[in-house]
Image: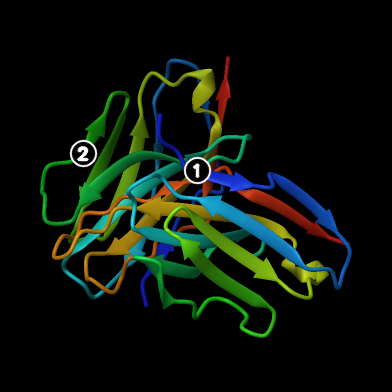
Amino acid sequence: DARVTQTPRDKVTEMGQEVTMRCQPILGHNTVFWYRQTMMQGLELLAYFRNRAPLDDSGMPKDRFSAEMPDATLATLKIQPSEPRDSAVYFCASGLGLPGAHQETQYFGPGTRLLVL
Amino acid sequence: AQTVTQSQPEMSVQEAETVTLSCTYDTSESDYYLFWYKQPPSRQMILVIRQEAYKQQNATENRFSVNFQKAAKSFSLKISDSQLGDAAMYFCAYRSAGAAGNKLTFGGGTRVLVKP
């Protein structure tokens, strides 16, 4: 049963600390998305990658957030320094985007709930 | 930019009955995809159903079906024979079919309560 995995599931940290969230996309998927869910803003895209290259990170605060894909099986989202307003659930999703094909369903991981005190 | 609106913050349904969730969207594109995702208390986002805009036939998945009205830009979800396990937040989402438009734009969600 292929699924997206995310670690940690929950994270509590203090303001100013570095936070790293990890995602393992479904094997063979070539697109990875990071979404953030808050009560106020709902679900919003932070960044996404295709074939490990960043395609769009316009939704991400550049001064403190960074997203990378060191290899095809790992995506990371890092916040440094973290702030209380970063408290949210962060979802990773993966999909299979084929050249010339539009069809691509995104499959979500269980999310990382982050609380910054 | 596309927007997705879910006008019902919460819906309640009796077990075994039917409930319909509404979703409207705004876009100038002609080719796109629409989705319904379910988020139970476990917070896992689960794909319920998908509709391609170029298909006139409404998608169905077991007890879940959609009413896709392209001209009206409406995409409602019908849950038939509701079960206790259907209780969750339901999100409508839009995705452009263009090569560069792979992100999902979500509505605000509708909470579904199922009464035994």
Which residue has dot 1 on it? Answer: B45
Viewer-closest of A69 and A66: A69
* Residue bearing the label numbered 2: B59
For label 1, count other residues whose C-alpha is less than 10 Å away and answer few (under 14), some (14-19) or many (20+): many
The kind of residue on which mark 1 rests is: Met
The quarter holding residue B40 reads top right
Helix, strand or loop at label 2? It is loop
- What's the residue at 28%, 74% (across, down)? B100
Mark 1 vs mark 2: in front: 1
Q: Is residue B45 left or right of residue A94?
A: right
Instruction: Tell me what residue is drawn at x 58 percent, y 62 percent.
Output: A76
Disc 2 chain ID:
B
**Residue A42 visible to an observer of this rendering:** no
Q: Dot 1 lies on which element? A: loop
Q: Furthest residue to the front?
A: A71
Q: Is residue B67 above or below residue B84?
A: below
Which of the 4 image quarters holds residue B65? top left
Is A33 in front, or is A52? A52
Separation of marks 1 and 2 at Cα, in angstroms: 19 Å
Q: Nearer the viewer, residue A108 or B110?
A: A108
Image position, residue A78 (x, y; %): 66, 68
Amino acid of disc 2: Ala
Please state the horizontal and vertical placement of residue B57, each as a whole percent of the image. 12, 42
